[in-house]
Amino acid sequence: MSRVRVRRYKEGDAESLAQIFFRSVHEGARADYTREQVDAWATEAPSPALFEQRARDGRSVFVAADDDGVVAYGDLEPDGHIDHLYCAPEYIGSGVGSVLYDAVEALAIRQGIARLYVEASESARRLFERKGFTVRARQELCLRGIPMHNYLMDKSLQRGSTAD
């Protein structure tokens, strides 16, 4: 694997993010979810316009890129919510998600955000637990009539305290 660098989202990244999202769900999440569940989660690759819009709605979007292009992305909303953190399937387990998360957390600390929270998939739960997040609840969901689950997790960024 060539050297991966984390940077802010820039115009032109949207197509890559749409493809990473779709591939991550359909290829990466298959270890933890059924075919029916991943089809309900992402019926098709989202429009790149959706990612352009998300990059302009007040959240901070980071991408991890190597010499061949974007391989992962994540975001941070102003209230500490991490809505997306996705890696191309061939980079899952390579440490790219961890490096990307570290950039998101560093920004949150610089911005004075006291608590991060996420609704994590089964596989993302493992990454967030390694990063110090606590599972608050397993959430049972129904997407397009298909039952699935994720985990409500959070992490305090204030030294010496825990999120209660």
Image (cartoon, rainbow, N blue to C red):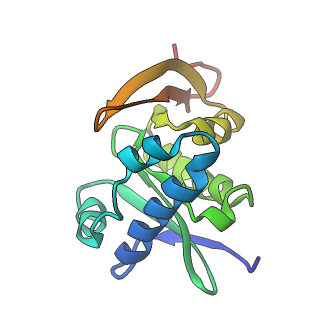
Image coords of residue 68 (percent x, y)? 60, 86
Image coords of residue 34 (percent x, y)? 53, 41
Q: Is residue 141 above or below residue 112?
A: above
Give me the residue at 74% from left, 61% from top: 94
User: Quarter holding the N terminus?
Assistant: bottom right
Is 101 positioned to the left or the right of 49 in the image? right
Q: Is residue 154 above or below residue 59?
A: above
Q: Is residue 75 above or below residue 116?
A: below
Is 18 positioned to the left or the right of 27 in the image? left
Image coords of residue 154 (percent x, y)? 52, 28
Give me the residue at 43% from left, 47% from top: 111
Total numbered labels: 0
- Residue reaching furthest to the top: 164
Image coords of residue 48 (percent x, y)? 29, 71
Give me the residue at 34% from left, 61% from top: 44
Give me the residue at 67% from left, 67% from top: 90
* Image-quadrant location for residue 125: top right
Residue closer to the observer: 72 or 80 = 72
- Residue reaching furthest to the front: 36
* Image-quadrant location for residue 17: bottom left
Residue closer to the observer: 46 or 40 = 40
Q: Is residue 10 above or below residue 86?
A: below
Is 73 positioned to the left or the right of 77 in the image? right
